[in-house]
Amino acid sequence: MNEAVSSETALVRGIDRFTDITGRMLAWSVLAMALITTAVVVLRYGFHTGSIALQEAITYLHGSLFMLGAAYALKHGAHVRVDIFYREFSPRSQAWVNALGGIVFLLPLCALVMLVSWGYVEEAWRIRERSPEPGGIPYLYLLKTLLPLMAINLALAGIADILRHARLLVKGDGA
């Protein structure tokens, strides 16, 4: 029993470490987006020229931040929650809501996103889909790959969250 708890704890710690590292790396994309946006504005209004690739880079960074940052938001409780009743619940009741919510809603949603996006992304990779804009980034298939990556990343964070709340329920903390 103790070995199972230890391996579960190691799994949760490993997923949390991965989620935190990913989240911290993604935080730098905010600075990159700000700098690139500044460059686009300076080019447009200062030099009367533009760059489709720079504009698309902002979209790629923005997509990466929000799609891959969802797991970090879940881990740190920064996700959207309708907490009209939740905030009044005991810690044990909150753990039940969080664990069941992960099992009933989050993991099936991640599976659905994977299922629905797989063919879409596979086709984009098969044809090495490019930007439809002249001078755009020729890696649109990478942007589309964020869909299944988000599902995998969020599912991993969800599993860690479910295990964390299940451990609270088993220990009986916060009754």
Image (tube, rainbow, N blue to C red):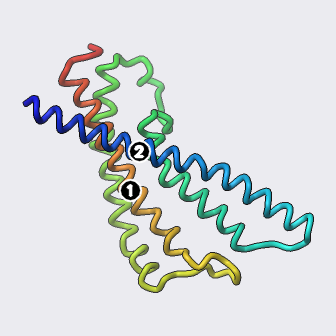
What is the quadrant of the C terminus in the image? Answer: top left
Q: Earlier along the polypeptide chain: callout 1 or callout 2?
A: 2
Residue 78: x and y, percent? 50, 35
Left-right relation of 67 to 154: right
Report the residue that reaches farthest toward the left: 1
As drawn, 12 above or below 146: above
- The crowding category of the residue bearing disc 1, from other C-alpha atoms within 10 Å (few below 14, some 14 to 19, many at least 20), is many
Left-right relation of 147 to 60: left
What residue is pinned by disc 1? Answer: 151
- Residue 111 or residue 73, whichever sits in front: 73
Q: Quadrant of residue 52?
A: bottom right
What residue is pinned by disc 2? Answer: 19
- Residue 78 or residue 49, whichever sits in front: 49
Q: Residue at x 31, y 49 (%)?
A: 107
Q: Secondary structure at mark 1?
A: helix
| Number of numbered tags placed on the structure image | 2
What is the quadrant of the N terminus in the image? Answer: top left
Q: Residue at x 73, y 59 (%)?
A: 36
Q: Quadrant of residue 101?
A: top left
Left-right relation of 53 to 14: right
Report the residue that reaches farthest toward the top: 175
Q: Give the amino acid type for the residue marked by disc 1 in the picture.
A: Ala
- The crowding category of the residue bearing disc 2, from other C-alpha atoms within 10 Å (few below 14, some 14 to 19, many at least 20), is many
Residue 110: x and y, percent? 35, 54
Q: Give the amino acid type for the residue marked by disc 2 in the picture.
A: Thr
Q: Residue at x 25, y 24 (%)?
A: 168
Q: Secondary structure at mark 2?
A: helix
Q: CA distance from mark 1 to mark 2?
A: 13 Å
Q: Residue at x 31, y 22 (%)?
A: 93
As drawn, 164 above or below 111: above
Residue 18 - label:
none
As drawn, 63 above or below 53: above
